[in-house]
Image: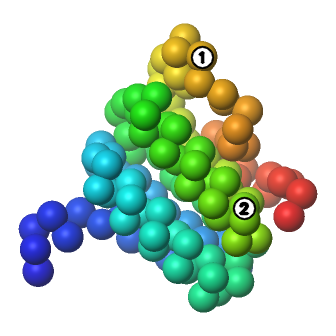
Amino acid sequence: MDPVEETRVPVSMIGKVVFASLQIDPHPQLLEWLREDLARRVVHSRATRVLLDLSGLVTLDEHEYAHLVTTASMLKLLGASTVLVGMRPGTVAALAALDADLSAVPGACDVAQGLALKTGD
């Protein structure tokens, strides 16, 4: 297996919810693979919710965040709402300082709160 291929983010199910946890700093190829894997899982499982756990990330820049927002928009077209969980306060503050649209994707403090969050799906 290609060493770069090993950095794919595992995508699994928690009940009827698609779940992925980013534990390494995202690079463009990783984010693209994640987008493809999430879309494939949503279509295959007919899930209506996706949780992206970002608690393992130390930083998230505006380009990486924008990629996640675009991924969430794409998943919405496939019938699944996305919730970002576990973003660090410093990351949220930095994105706010950069005028990132923090209302573009719902957020939750942790996975349990993300699972309980009502998003209109």
Q: Which mark is residue 59?
A: none
Please state, as top left, top right, bottom left or bottom right, where the N terminus lies in the image.
bottom left
Left or right: residue 41 compared with residue 74? left
Against 47, residue 35 (above or below) is above
- In the displayed structure, does residue 79 sit left or right of residue 65? right
Q: Residue at x 10, y 74 (%)?
A: 2
Coordinates of residue 105 in the picture (x, y in percent)? 69, 43
| Point 48% across, 45% down: residue | 67
**Colouring mode (rainbow / by chain / secondary structure / one colour):** rainbow
User: Label 2 to label 1, Cα distance in Å?
Assistant: 23 Å
Quarter the C terminus occupies: bottom right
Name, please, the residue furthest toward the top: 97
Q: Quadrant of residue 21?
A: bottom left
Identify whether 85 is placed above or below 15.
above
Where residue 101 sits: x, y (%)? 66, 28
Q: Which mark is residue 99?
A: 1
Q: Is 119 on the left or on the right of 8, as rendered?
A: right
Name the amino acid, label 1.
Asp
CB-based contact (under 8 Å), mark 2 and mark 1 = no
Disc 2 marks a residue whose amino acid type is Lys
Q: Which residue is mark 2?
A: 76
**Numbered-mark total:** 2
